[in-house]
Structures are given as C-alpha cells and as structure tokens.
Amino acid sequence: MIEGAKWRTWVYFYLPMAFFLLFLLFPFYWMIITSFRPDGELYRPWNSVNYNPFWTTKPTLEHVRYLFEETLFSAWLWNTTFIALVSTAISLVCGVFAGYALSRLNFPFAGSLGTGIFITYLVPQTLLFIPLAEIIRNYNLGDTSWSLILTYPTFLIPFCTWLMMGYFKAVPKELEECARIDGASRWQAMLYIIIPVAIPGILSAGIFAFTLSWNEFIYALVFLSSPAQKTVPVGVTSELIRGDVFFWGPLMAGALLGSIPVAVAYSFFVEHYVSGLTGSVKG
Amino acid sequence: MAVEAITTFNTPPQPRRQRVLEDERWLAFMLLVPTVILLGLFIAYPFVRGILLSVTNTRVGVAGDFVGFANYYKIWNDSIFRTAVYNTFLYTAVTTVFKLGLGLWLAILLNRNFRGKAFTRAFILLPFIIPTVLSTFAWRWMFDPTFSVINWTLYHLGVITGRINWLGDPDLAMISIIVVNIWRGVPFFAISLLAGLQTISPELNEAAAIDGAKPWQRFWHITWPLLLPVTMVVVLFSVIQTLADFQIVYVMTGGGPANATHLFATYAYQIGVGTGLLSEGAAISLAMFPVLLLIVIIQLLYIRRVETR
Amino acid sequence: MAQVVLKSINKFYDAVHAVKDVNLQIRDKEFVVFVGPSGCGKTTTLRMIAGLEAISSGDISIDGQVVNELAPMDRDIAMVFQNYALYPHMSVFDNMAFGLKMRKFEKKEITQRVKAAADILGIGEYLARKPRQLSGGQRQRVALGRAIVRHPKVFLFDEPLSNLDAKLRVQMRVELKKLHQRLGTTAVYVTHDQVEAMTLGDRVVVMKDGVVQQVGDPLELYNRPANKFVAGFIGSPAMNFATVTMADGNGRITAKNAGLEIEIPGAQAERLRAHLGRQLMLGIRPEDLHVAHAGDPKGLTFNSRVEVVEKLGSEILLDVRVGEDSMVAAVDPTTQAKAQDQLQLAVNPERLHFFDSRTEAAL
C-alpha cells in the first residue's frame, strides 16, 4: 500500500524494531560477555574511570572452568536434561492419548473431563507446592529425579492434550473410516493413521513441553536438597551464591551454559514451537 | 429344514482384548486412565490436602490439630501478607498492560514482510524460551546497585550523578521486577497476537483504507475488534501465570528489601519452607485461589461473549 | 470528468516484470474490462490504480490529476473485492456506512445514502444482519452497496463474480450492467472470464504476461483479433487453429495441410500473396463451420472424422479430426451425426483468420 515518504518507514518500523530487539536481546549479550570477562574487569563499580562494560580485552574461560570443576554443574545439566526428556515423553504419550480420546471418541462425560483437564492447567505450581512436598516425602521420592518426573506432567499434560486435540480435530474423519473399512481396529487406526498425520502437532507439543520442563523452578527447589540431585536453575541459584556473595562470573557462565541446551533444541524446532504456542491460544 | 441349516452359522466370539479396543467407551477409558491418575494424584489430591493443611497448625515434623480458620485470620492480620496481596495485584495489572501494549506493537511490526523476518521472530522468543531463573540472573546483574550497567549508561549519558539503588529501595525494586516480567512476557504476547493478526484478511485493511480510514482508525475499528478473542485468551493465560509468579521475585529480590516485594508465591515459600510453618504457608498459597478463580471466570465469560458477538 | 489515464505503467516485483508498459485512456463513464489468464498482470494493474500497490514507473491520473503518490483514500475511488472483504463484526448497515463515517459525513446523510443504495440493490431488509448470516450473492450486493454510497469518481472491481455459482453469476452480470447504465460512473473491471468481459465491457483490454495484447470493443476483439492469443481467448468454444502452408493452386491462393485445402477468396488472397510458400496459422471459429451441403463450393469444404458429439440443445458441438488436427464445429441442432462418422465440413469464407507462425500477429 502506498504509505508516503521513505522516512516514515524508518521512524515507524526500523527504529521501533531496533528498540525491541535491543531490549529483548541485550540481557543475553550481557550474559555472554560477563561469562568471559576476568574477575578484575567484572568487579569494578559502575562509576569507575575508564570503564567500558560492554567489551573485554582479556577474554577468559576461567569461569567456565570453575563451573565444571568446582561445582556439580555437569551433574545438574544431566539431571535437568534427563528429567525434561522423560517428563516430555510421559506427557506426550498421555497427551496424545487423551487428546485423541477427547476429540474423536464419543463417551459419557467427555465434555466435563475435557473441562476438568483444562481447569488443572489453571492451577499454578506455586499453589500446590507445599502439600505436594509433603506427599512426595511420604512416598519416599524426596530428593530424587523421580519426584520431578512424576510431577512435571501435571502441567505438561493439560497443555499437550489441548494442543493435540486441536491437531486431531483437523484430521478428516474419512481417513479413519477408510482405515477401519480396510480392516483396522480403532486402536490400530489411531496408531498407524491418525498419529502419523498429527506428527507436526506432536513435535510442537514436545518442544514446548521440553522448554517448560527446563523452566520449572519451584518444585525442583522444594523437592530436591542434595547438590548432586539438583537441576540447573536450582543449582545455579543455590550453589553459586555463598551468603551475600554472588560469584557473578561463574553465575553468568552457568546461566549461559544452562540456556544453551534449550536454545539449541528450540532452534531446531522453531516453527513447531511457534505453531504450538499459537495453536494453544487460537484453539 | 435345509434352509434353516444354511441361514444360521456361528461366528466365534471376538477375543476379549479386541472387543475392548473396538468399543469406543472402553478405548476412551484406557486412553484417559494414565492422565486421570497422574492429574488426580498430583493435582487434585494435593489440592485437597492443601486445604486440609491450611486449617490445621502443622509445622515441619510436628503434626498439627484442627484450628479452623485461625491461619487465615493470622495471615490477614499480617502486614507483610497484605503488602504481598497488594504487590501481586499491582504487579499483575501493570505488567499485563505493558505486555499487551508492547506485545501488540511488536506484533504489528512483525506483520509486515521484511528480510530476515523468520530469524527475527525466532530471536524474539528467546526471553520466553530461556529458563526464567537464568535470564533473571542476568537482569539481577544488570540491576545490581554497585555494578549496574544501567547505572553506568545513565551516568555516561549525564542523566544521573549518584547511583540508583535499584534493588535496595522498595519502589525501585518493584519497578525492577516489573521490568523483568514485562521483558519475559512481551514475546509471548507478540507471537500469539501476531498469529491472531495473520488470521485477519489483508483485504479488510485494504477495503478500510479505500473507505477512507487512516492507519489508526483502521486499527481501532477493524483490527482490534477482530483480534479481541485472541487477545482475551492471551491475557487470561498471562494473568494466571503472573499472579502465581515466583521465579523472578525470588532471584531478583528474594522478596526484599525488607519484605517489600513479596508476592503470594514468594511469601508462601518464605513462611512454609523457609520458617517451616507449613499450615500458614499453605493458607497463603490457597489465598491465591479464589482470586484466580474469579479472574478466570470473568475472563471466560467475556471471551464467550466476544466470540458469539 | 472521471477519466483514468495509464501512461507507460510498469511494475516490478524484485526481478519479475509483472506489468509491462501499459498505456490506456479510459473515458469518463466508460466501463473497461481487463481480461486475461491468471498471472497476466490485470489485478496488479487494478491495484496500482487503487493505490494498493506502488507503481514502479509510469503515471496514473484520475480526472486529470496524477495520483501516483496519493494514498488510496485520497483518490476518490471505491473497490469491490473478489472475497467481498466485508467487516465481519459489523452489521450490513455499518459496513456500508463505514466509509462515510470515516469521512465525517452527517448521520442523516449517511442513513439516506445507505438506504438509497440498499434499495437499488434490493438488500434493504438485511441492514441489521451480519455478513455471516448472508448468502454469497447477498454479501456481494453489500460489497457493491459499500462502494456505491461513496459516490466515487471510479469504481474498481476485482473479479467480483468469481466466487458465485454459475447461475448467480449470469444474473449478477446483468444487474451490474444495469447498475452501470443507471449510475454512469467510470468503471474498471478485472476478470478471467471472457464472457463477463464481452457482456460488461464498453471496451475490453486483453492482457497476457503483463503485456496488453489488444484494446477494443467486444465485437472488434471478436471479429478482428490482433493476434493468436486474443483470437483463442475470446469466444467460446475457442477458435480452432491449424498450421497451413500457403500454396498457389491454379491461380488461386490456397491454405493447405494434410487434412484440408481451402481457397482464399478475393481481397484476403491478395494480402496473403506475399506469404506464398510459407507456413501460417489458420484460425476458424467453431460457429463459422457448418456441415457442407450441395451448394457449397468445393474449395471451401474439407473432410473430417467425428470423434465426440456434444448435444447442447441450442446447438451441437462436434469434436472432429481433420488430418492431424482436432477441431470443434458448432452446428445446427438438427444435425444427424455420430462418432466415427465421416463428415464434410464447410467454412464461411469471410471468417478466415491468419496469423504469422512466429510472431502470432494477425495478417
């Protein structure tokens, strides 16, 4: 559309866009640069002379080394990844099954069950963590990865279910009917026909669930106590701060390296993540 | 006789497993069982126990007796709790308004075709993808009164002479956590609203332009009303998550300075886990629930009204 | 005076030259139709007139004023979209009133204009309804109404009938023509349907690959197509083409190939003498072929084999084979013919078209 002078594009588009990108991405730059600056440069008050905080002349891997050698960071990475993968797997299976049942099968209470699952999505973890901690302890799951693997699906499943329902609804009924005429049982039709067609949806739900697991904090904080069991967010928070002293170098390195697995996984599935996000909102 | 012999022949009964998998209701039951068990065990059950916990006086290691609403009276008279309630509402209201405004602006910008659009869109989601605790630490580092890069920038731009005590001053600390929450939420709003914008046919905009509507008028009369259903859903999700927010406050201020920035969740943690007063902690957590429920109901009704308009 | 003048209009999409050097003068009150296959540039040209696309080079003037840099709302035009583009959340009344509201008309004036347009179009009783409660044809009228109330200088139509079913399309075509006769506003109309073009246009612009092939009134395009493309595009069923060699047969010029040999009559023969010995494209419309009878001169007939008989009631279409070519003949509905019959066909000598094999221009 004709919009007028060229300067308008600059003022109304490029400038705001640049502002947004700067605002949204600067903290990551900050994370990166801090991870590789020596302590001497880091701990200079903001109004020191000749101080340029945006760049470093002596990059160092000291903090990364500290992270891996003096703390249990690698254990935390492993824990978090393992927990995320298993919870995602459990949630996907449950979500796919539940989504299929709710969207393509007729049975009594289908509506209320669907609503019930939706409602559990609205119950935040910060409401349940105290009684849940007690329950976990009673089952002797305290301080193990399993406490998280079993509880993370509580907020992953509703989302996966909902997302899959949307995808399943879009698969035409004729596909299933054709398969059943060809001799497949409902179960086989679901397994061999419907689910393969809904694979993009499964990928979307999967990557979304994976990032949500990595992001979880309060359950991990409350259920885990020994350093070797901790996840990355909890470990970084509790082990890299001694009293009032923040070890900013390793802290930022930990934050950076802790973000990388999620960022990498996300980068492979960006389109799926976006359609998962938007599917849940539009559906 | 011969006729009868031909017309009846026995089909062997279907094996039981096959029958179960065929019947819609049985299949649905089997498919839903794992979900129902998990959700029942780890959401419904704790919820009920939480309520029970909040009406006793349990502490860590010490079983409690039934005390009725005593815990609720106690927290209502606790000034820190009242501050936390006020904070939570303020926090949610302010951040939601900004997230909606900025998110919408960004969505409109992203709705054009420009080079590198796919990359930009992918990068923009990073604040939402990266574990909140980790990115909040970066912000903590940026806001730290002694080492703050923000202070450095403002100082060198000549705006300030003394330092800004971001995290030490109660009001500034609130501003800090609000900024971080906005930072994290804008991408979610932007991408979701962008998807909504893309469902609006560009022809509508063109028709409105020919009809004489200027860009602002086109937005107000055409785009905004058609975007309302998506907007309401996004706001609903965001409000729920923000009311229950924990990570940002925990990392940035821990609830301080002097308990000035507590929200429901962080105060419940401090009381329940920090000092071991489980019942009171549970009461604080549950105090969140009626508010949540009310907001959810209001928004769902509004969404229904908007969609059938 | 609402003339629209297109001067050397070009449009580039990156490296793609979508519209190539279009020149056209549309007179006041004229109804001009742009027609052509998809991708020919007709819609792009329309959108440039509307201001929805920027012009790469050239000038467009409306009513004497160059409008290249003007925003759509300042050009005093109204447009009817293929998908109607009705505002789904507004009632029919509000849809039609929107443009007037934006231009700050008084409420009374708005109501009056909307009611008047609704009456003309017969949608008066739907004013309170929402678009989703209307049928395709009704929505189309609302879109028309929205354009009419503005009393613009130029109407622009972007394939407005394409989404209607066949019967409705025929009906709406007539109504559009009546509307134009009544309102008299200059109109630019885009379609891919040549029947619409022929019935609606005062003049028709045929486009292909961004280039204007021919401009003229419908009969001119039908009788004297400028090139093979226009000849094959206008008229239904399409014109038959056959490659022929120009030969001299007993002092008369003939067009000859494996299946036929036709003697060219008088004046046309003299014009084609220059092409003796060369290969040309012969074009004959199906309606200019008939079953040969005793009175037809031998030089105007040829043999054919019937492959398919299509009985339409008003005429019969014979799909025949002539030598190596397939042709269609539209013949009298009483003709008795069936598949595999050998049939003698005769041509109308006044209605032979010849085209250069390389340039495809009419000769």
Image (spheres, coloured by chain):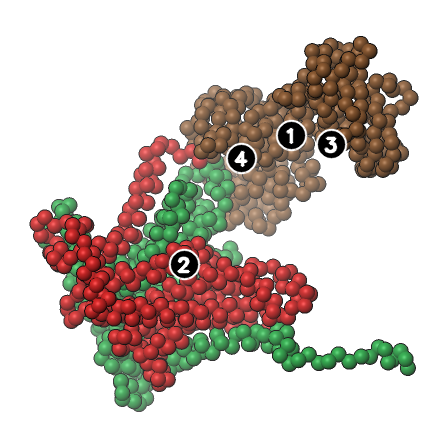
Chain colours: A red, B green, C brown
Disc 3: which chain? C
Disc 3 and disc 2 on one polypeptide chain: no
Along the viewing direction, whichever of B204 and A131 lies nearer the viewer: A131
Viewer-nearest of discs 2 and 4? 2
Q: Are the residues flagged by discs 1 and 4 from a single subunit?
A: yes
Whole-angstrom CA distance, mark 2 to mark 4, is 35 Å
- Residue position marked by numbered label 2 in the rendering: B234
Mark 2 touches mark 4? (CB < 8 Å): no
What residue did someone put label 1 on?
Answer: C197
Q: Which residue is disc 4 drawn over?
A: C79
Disc 4 versus disc 3: nearer the observer: 3
Secondary structure type for disc 3 = loop
Q: Secondary structure at mark 2?
A: helix
Task: Tell me which amino acid carries mark 4.
Answer: Met
Q: Are marks 1 and 4 in contact (CB under 8 Å)?
A: no
Residue drawn at the location 44% of the way across and 52% of the way down: B195
Q: Which residue lies at the image location 77% right of the left edge and 20% below the top edge?
A: C256
Pointer 1 indicates a residue of which chain?
A: C
> Residue B233, image x and y in percent?
43, 59
* Amino acid type at image mark 3: Pro
Q: CA distance from mark 1 to mark 3?
A: 15 Å
